[in-house]
């Protein structure tokens, strides 16, 4: 295409149009970046600078007081540990279940596959609602247990659809027929042929579920009662949104200092809660885009 | 999902769901006669309608603009950055909103004071609630949604561009006559899905942004269900309200889908 566009030169109007586009995109770039940089800068500025509004873009009087204080807050550390736990186990369970349900659905020989698929997609459009779901979890005796965060939302229909269309398009039926003749069982086929061939889609599933689990708070909010099971997001909510400052830890400090630190803590908390995801993000963005494209092709 | 029968029963903890007596449409009638009914429906539709009107075209424009950019590095940078906020959790997103809009120390008010304006208690103003919700949502999700359109744009036959170029089309004309028709099916699908989730608008974020001051505009059906159902243990009533919401949603989805099928031949089934 590049060779073609060289033959016919851009007109003046086109060039102005293009410049306009660049300007708008730059504005968007700044609008997206600014709040992120601001939060990051605030988290590593001194408490006094944050509360007096001296931070505009870059950090002022760099200090790591906020992070140090967080390290000494047991609530936050417990939350961090819990979040890592939920993310690790939740992702393993979800990915395993998603493969187990979407692979059979991708095979033409699977009995009742269309009916099952319609039932699954239907839940995407129509759900029983909050209370019925809650009652199911309650009847299963999962209230206030770690399993409540791992099981009820283990499968996302959208991921099943994506995985299914991947299996359909990249694992030909002939492959299965060939292995069957060689005496390969279904389970063995799934384990030693399908899974190694599906690494791209498995990577997408792992990433999506892991990010979802790390960011989730709502299930924890309704199903959990004991504070020592809370994930980080719920702790975050109580400290920043409900403004219950992480008590106890700041007893010895003077009033003003305490208030300043409380304000700074909020920024530091945001940073440590988001950092794991944002750090891996540039490396995995490619997979996310890939996953979305597989999904959008199917509609 | 079978538990939706709760909506038609008088739930009794001891008898359990199936043992409780049937009461027919009692809870639905209770909801329709409730003075909260219209405000709830209105708030739900206003918030999601606003989000639909403002939030739907922006990712399309973003994708069209990005598609014009020939400088690969710049394009990658914009994509990388605009995609990033999608990974911020709802709690963090709301935390950032609250910190920025805080009445005393929030960045926006500090800036307003700096330029000689009075502080505004943004989250305490019911009138501001919808805009705060909608524009923060666009900030967070526009880059992500744009990827879908970029994928569709990448699938357009390059010979169409060459033909347009030979015919002397300007960049703008190319967008109107080649790009837009090319991604129209995708646009329609996304639109159907968006309209189909009008009533299912993001509970999580609205719930976190709510406070007693802005409740007039921020109490939507989903948050109401949570309040009466889980906080006040009024299970049957809450289930009825939730079911009403889901049914309206389904009706919307089905009707938009059939409209789209008739006028543009694209539909989700």
Image (cartoon, helix red, strand yellow):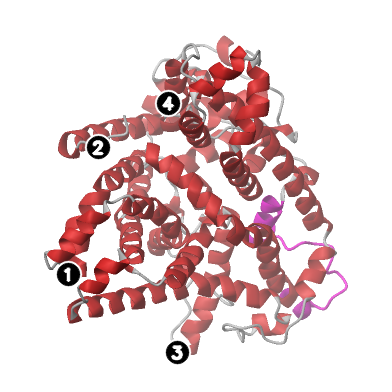
Asked if badge 2 and badge 1 are on a common chain, one would say yes
Mark pair 4, 3: CA separation = 55 Å
Q: Position of residue A192 (x, y in %)?
A: 67, 27
Q: In the rendered structure, which segment of residues is drawn in magenta? A: A232-259
Q: Is residue A244 magenta?
A: yes
Quadrant of residue B98 within the rendered picture: bottom right
Q: Position of residue A80 (x, y in %)?
A: 76, 53
Q: Residues within 10 Å of mark 2 (few under 14, many from 20)?
A: some
Look at discs 3 and 2 and give the one toward the viewer: 2
Mark pair 3, 2: CA separation = 53 Å
Label 1: which secondary element = loop
What residue is disc 2 on? B266
Residue B104: in sight, yes or no? yes
From the image, which quarter does the C terminus of chain B lie in? top left
Q: Residue at x 81, y 69 (%)?
A: A69
Mark pair 1, 4: CA separation = 45 Å
Q: How many labels does the image show?
A: 4
Mark pair 3, 1: CA separation = 45 Å
- Image-based side of A189 in relation to B158, left or right: right
Q: Where is residue B3 in the image (x, y as percent from the top left)?
A: 53, 20
- Image-based side of A227 in relation to B93, left or right: right
What residue is disc 4 on? A122
Label 2: which secondary element = loop
Look at discs 2 and 1 and give the one toward the viewer: 1
The chain under label 3 reads B
Mark pair 2, 1: CA separation = 29 Å
Q: Give the label on residue B170, or none.
A: 1
Q: Give the label on residue A210, or none.
A: none
Q: Which of marks 2 and 1 is nearer the N terminus?
A: 1
Q: Residues within 10 Å of mark 3 (few under 14, many from 20)?
A: few
What residue is disc 3 on? B116
| Residue at the extreme right | A252
């Amino acid at each position: 295409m590049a060779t073609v566009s060289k033959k016919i030169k851009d007109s003046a109007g086109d060039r102005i149009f293009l410049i306009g586009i660049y300007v708008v995109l730059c504005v968007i770039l700044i609008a997206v970046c600014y709040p992120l940089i601001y939060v990051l800068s605030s988290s590593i500025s001194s408490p006094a600078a944050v509360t007096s509004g001296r931070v505009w873009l870059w950090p002022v009087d760099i200090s790591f007081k906020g992070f140090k204080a967080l390290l000494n807050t047991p609530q936050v550390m417990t939350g961090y540990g819990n979040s890592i736990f939920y993310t690790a186990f939740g992702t393993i369970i979800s990915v395993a279940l998603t493969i187990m349900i979407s692979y059979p659905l991708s095979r033409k020989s699977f009995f009742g596959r269309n009916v099952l698929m319609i039932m699954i997609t239907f839940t995407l459009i129509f759900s029983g609602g909050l209370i019925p779901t809650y009652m199911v979890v309650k009847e299963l005796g999962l209230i206030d247990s770690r399993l409540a965060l791992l099981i009820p939302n283990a499968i996302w229909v959208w991921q099943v659809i994506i995985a299914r269309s991947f299996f359909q398009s990249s694992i030909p039926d002939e492959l299965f027929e060939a292995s069957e003749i060689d005496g390969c069982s279904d389970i063995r086929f799934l384990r030693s042929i399908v899974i190694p061939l599906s690494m791209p889609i498995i990577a997408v599933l792992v990433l999506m579920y892991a990010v979802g689990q790390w960011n989730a708070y709502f299930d924890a909010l309704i199903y959990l009662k004991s504070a020592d099971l809370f994930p980080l997001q719920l702790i975050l909510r109580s400290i920043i949104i409900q403004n219950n400052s992480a008590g106890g830890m700041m007893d010895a400090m003077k009033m003003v200092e305490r208030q300043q630190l409380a304000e700074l803590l909020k920024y530091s908390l945001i940073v440590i809660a988001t950092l794991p995801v944002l750090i891996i993000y540039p490396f995995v963005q490619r997979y996310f885009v890939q996953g979305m494209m597989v999904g959008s092709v199917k509609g | 999902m079978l538990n939706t029968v709760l909506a038609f029963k008088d739930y009794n903890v001891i008898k359990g769901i199936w043992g409780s007596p049937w009461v027919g449409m009692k809870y639905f009638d209770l909801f329709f006669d409730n003075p909260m009914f219209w405000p709830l429906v209105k708030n739900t539709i206003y918030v999601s309608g606003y989000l639909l009107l403002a939030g739907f075209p922006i990712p399309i424009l973003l994708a069209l603009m990005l598609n014009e950019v020939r400088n690969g590095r710049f394009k990658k940078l914009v994509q990388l950055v605009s995609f990033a906020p999608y990974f911020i959790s709802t709690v963090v997103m709301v935390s950032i909103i609250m910190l920025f809009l805080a009445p005393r120390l929030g960045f926006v008010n500090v800036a307003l004071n700096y330029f000689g304006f009075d502080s505004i208690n943004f989250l305490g103003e019911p009138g501001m609630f919808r805009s705060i919700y909608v524009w923060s949502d666009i900030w967070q999700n526009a880059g992500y949604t744009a990827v879908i359109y970029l994928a569709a744009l990448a699938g357009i036959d390059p010979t169409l561009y060459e033909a347009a170029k030979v015919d002397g089309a300007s960049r703008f004309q190319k967008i109107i006559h080649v790009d837009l028709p090319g991604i129209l099916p995708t646009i329609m699908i996304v639109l159907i899905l968006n309209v189909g989730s009008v009533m299912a608008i993001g509970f999580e974020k609205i719930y976190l942004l709510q406070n007693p001051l802005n409740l007039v505009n921020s109490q939507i059906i989903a948050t109401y269900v949570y309040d009466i159902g889980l906080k006040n243990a009024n299970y049957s009533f809450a289930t009825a309200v939730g079911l009403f919401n889901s049914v309206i949603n389904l009706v919307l989805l089905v009707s938009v889908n059939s409209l789209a099928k008739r006028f543009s031949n694209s539909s989700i089934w």
